[in-house]
Image: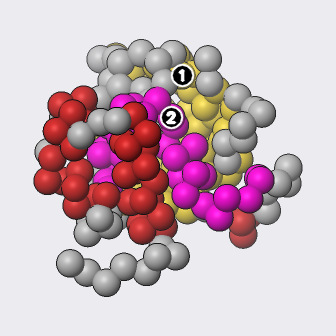
Amino acid sequence: MRDIDPASVDARLAVRLAELRDERGWSLDELAARTGISRSTLSRLERAEISPTAALLGRLCAAYERTMSRLLAEVESGREPAQLVRSAEQRVWTDAPSGFERRSVSPPHPALRAEIVEGVLRPGADITYEGPPVAGLEHHVWVREGALRVTVQGHAHDLAPGDCLRYRLWGTSRFHCPGPGPARYAVVLVLP
């Protein structure tokens, strides 16, 4: 087991994931059945032995019915989010193996239904989400740089800089950067 810095995002995320499972009274086996993630992987995530990938975190968020931004905000310091979110205060989460970087531009707030996330995918990066964290979650995907292919419930959309794709998500989605450069995009998420 690696040494864990209790102040690290991975350590706080591990604690929060264990708390969410405990709050629901689910065993590791039950959570594995709900998410399709092996029991051993879930155990290692909850002990902060491994960092979750974007795809794994997406499955867990779906099981716990919360957006990824909301989950990541829950592992922050616990202070009330400010109205003004300075660039230097926007949290960045990186899933290096998949080539995905996620910036919480406008983090979730209990009194608000929308949030803004910036995503950057390196060329060739491909992330599939099995389902939305919240059924009917509204998405507005606005491409700022590069090419992005977004597949929503089996229907593929090729987006170029300036294009915006709007949809409500009930099933699977996939984000793919065909290259040649990285894709930089913003996603506005609106809870139903």
Asked if residue 70 lies in the magenta stretch, the reply is: yes
Say above or below: 6 vs 133: below
For the point 72% across and 37% down, the residue is: 110
* Number of dots carrying numbers: 2
Q: Is residue 104 visible?
A: yes
Q: Can you name the residue that lies furthest to the bottom here?
A: 3
For the point 31% across and 84% down, the residue is: 3
Q: Can you name the residue that lies furthest to the right here?
A: 83
Task: Name the amino acid type tagged 2.
Answer: Arg
Q: Nearer the viewer, residue 116 or 63?
A: 63
Question: In the drawing, does residue 76 fall left or right of residue 34?
Answer: right
Say above or below: 104 vs 77: above
Q: Position of residue 91 (x, y in %)?
A: 61, 61
Q: Which mark is residue 66?
A: 2
From mark 2 to mark 1, how far is it between C-alphas?
10 Å
Q: What quarter of the picture does the C terminus occupy?
A: top right
Which callout, 2 or 1, points to the residue nearer the camera?
A: 2
- Badge 1 density bin: few <14, some 14–19, many ≥20, Cα 10 Å: some
Question: In the drawing, does residue 97 fall left or right of residue 141?
Answer: left
Corner quadrant of residue 63: top left
Q: Nearer the viewer, residue 37 or 132?
A: 37
Q: Position of residue 131 (x, y in %)?
A: 35, 26
The residue stretch that appears in magenta:
52-81
Q: Is residue 129 visible?
A: no
Residue receiving disc 1: 137
